[in-house]
Amino acid sequence: PIDRSFRVGGLVEEGSVQRDANGLTVRFVVTDMAQTVPVTYTGLLPDLFKEGKGVVAQGKLGADGVFRAEQV
């Protein structure tokens, strides 16, 4: 559902976390071991956010296929 707010959940894929130079924007991939969704988020991440751990993000899917999270 493009441009509609919803949640995605799964594991943060190992080796997928990339932080921008500004330090607040993070890109990562969420996987359920069958499908993957690239996610971008700007803001402070929870202390429990780590590669290989579970995550739930709320936001919108862009036309480019990237999920733009408003909350993690």
Image (cartoon, rainbow, N blue to C red):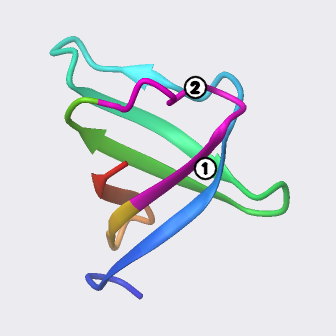
Give the amino acid type for the residue marked by disc 1 in the picture.
Val
Check the image and report above or below for 5 versus 56.
below
- The residue at 52%/26% (across/down) is 17
Residue named by callout 2: 50
Q: Is residue 11 magenta?
A: no
Q: Secondary structure at mark 1?
A: strand
- The residue at 61%/49% (across/down) is 30
Instruction: Point out the stretch of residues depicted in magenta.
Output: 45-57
Label 1 to label 2: alpha-carbon separation: 11 Å
Other residues around mark 1 within 10 Å, as few (<14) / some (14–19) / many (≥20): many
Q: Secondary structure at mark 2?
A: loop
Check the image and report above or below for 63 versus 28.
below
Residue named by callout 1: 30
Q: In this view, which residue lies farthest toward the left?
A: 22
**Which of pointers 1 and 2 lies earlier in the amino acid sequence?**
1
Other residues around mark 2 within 10 Å, as few (<14) / some (14–19) / many (≥20): some
Q: In this view, which residue lies farthest toward the front?
A: 47
